[in-house]
Image (tube, rainbow, N blue to C red):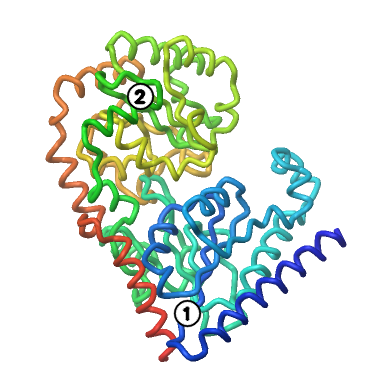
Amino acid sequence: MHAQNNLIVTLISSLRFQVLSKRCIDVNRESKPTIVFYAAHSTSLLLECWDFLKDRAECYWVTPHPNVYAELKSVGCQNIVNEQQFDLVRAFIGKSFRKINSFLPDAHERYVRNTIQIIESVDPDIVITNTVYLLKKYIPNNPRTIKVQLFHSVPYKTHIILPEALDYDLILLPGEYHRKTFIDRFNLKDATKLQSVGWPRTDKLITQPLSDDQKKSLLKQYNLDPELQTVSYAPTWNAFYDKGLFPRSFGHLAKAFEDFCREMMKLNINLVIRLHPGSHKLIEKENLNSIARKYNVCLFYKKQITHLDNTVYDFLSITDILVSDMSGIITDFMVLNRPIIYIEPEVDSEGKKIDWDINDLPKDFRAGPVVDSMDDLISSVKQALEDPYKYKLKREETLKKIFYKLDGFSSERAANAILQYYRNFTRQ
């Protein structure tokens, strides 16, 4: 423990020296705000905003995730701290951290404290994150520091419209539906902190769509037939009891999975399975991997690192028909206006029976058939292959309700909104 604390102190001192040195160098130039991006498990929206802020601010990154760290390095980010390098307990425990966390009751609290210490060492003007809970109680030492929440997904389940999100100074939202729902649900009198900017993760899909040749090349990379259509199944990790792959009504997990794979093969299509990282127990099941190999199914997580957000663009671009439940991947994919099939979820994010009244999006925002059996799922896939335009107008109408200005400039709007809010805040 003593060694761990010494490492943290050394890290903090080093970071503070770097920041103060840079500020001294910049003394004769127009002052730039110092920004810390906290990426707990993904870079979604953070990288998109960083791209527009990196030349207008002094940017630092803090992440506990080694794959996120690797991704940040690969795209040229600097000033990155991977907390795991400085947390001996987490490094030693590794994958077993969650399993024995109950024997270390203060481990999570210590981890949060260390994170806050590292962030505070930079003395930031702005702290930006895409996850709500870890920094919700973080109160900066500097009263002029603002906390910004971006979120990392726009799902149907409860994820964005949370009371905890209101602990942030600025909340950037995908559109007016979420903003109005925030105001109504929590009876807000002052909604200044709520700003609709659009959804940065869709910018690249809009401005840089894959050509047919690029799509075929990508399919070949994943060992898929470039001449066939591709159906992708991307369930969220907690839509079904026991975090299963399908509802219990679909039958035994392995049998249901093999039935699905076999029926998709009969349709002469590519089948891709993209499991959420939270489904780690399913990812590790050898019987499911064996079934996938038997039917030449692409397990997307096997084709890249387990951190999945940096492959969303590739995954969506090669998908012709998406099957999911309440996942945020649905609203991303809807931008492409291709068929979506919804499996009726069984439980919410807390494992309770679904209460659509408290979900982020209502059930009538589902722009496609909703199925509750394997037979209905197979039938709906066949119909989508035959008539991909059946729900085209519904998808377009739903998109307009969810997203503000699908013009490819959401990332830029988000970055500008952050800087403008900071300027207004510091003038008060």
The residue lying furthest to the right in this view is: 2
Q: Which residue is at the front of the view, 307 or 381?
A: 307
Circles 1 and 2 in contact, beta carbons < 8 Å: no
* Quadrant occupied by the C terminus: bottom left
Quarter of the image for residue 242 reads top right
Q: Given the image, on which type of amino acid does mark 2 rest?
A: Lys
Residue drawn where x is 45% and y is 64% of the image: 149
Q: Residue 142 carries which label?
A: none
Give residue 37's position: percent from left, percent from top. 51, 64
Give residue 342's position: percent from left, percent from top. 31, 31
Relative to 215, residue 418 above or below = below
Quarter of the image for residue 272 reads top left
Q: Which mark is residue 220?
A: 2
Give residue 170's position: percent from left, percent from top. 41, 71
Quarter of the image for residue 225 reads top left
Relative to 79, residue 236 above or below = above
Q: Given the image, on which type of amino acid does mark 1 rest?
A: Pro
Q: Residue 33 carries which label?
A: 1
Residue 209 seen in render? yes
Give the spatial CA distance, label 1 vs label 2.
45 Å
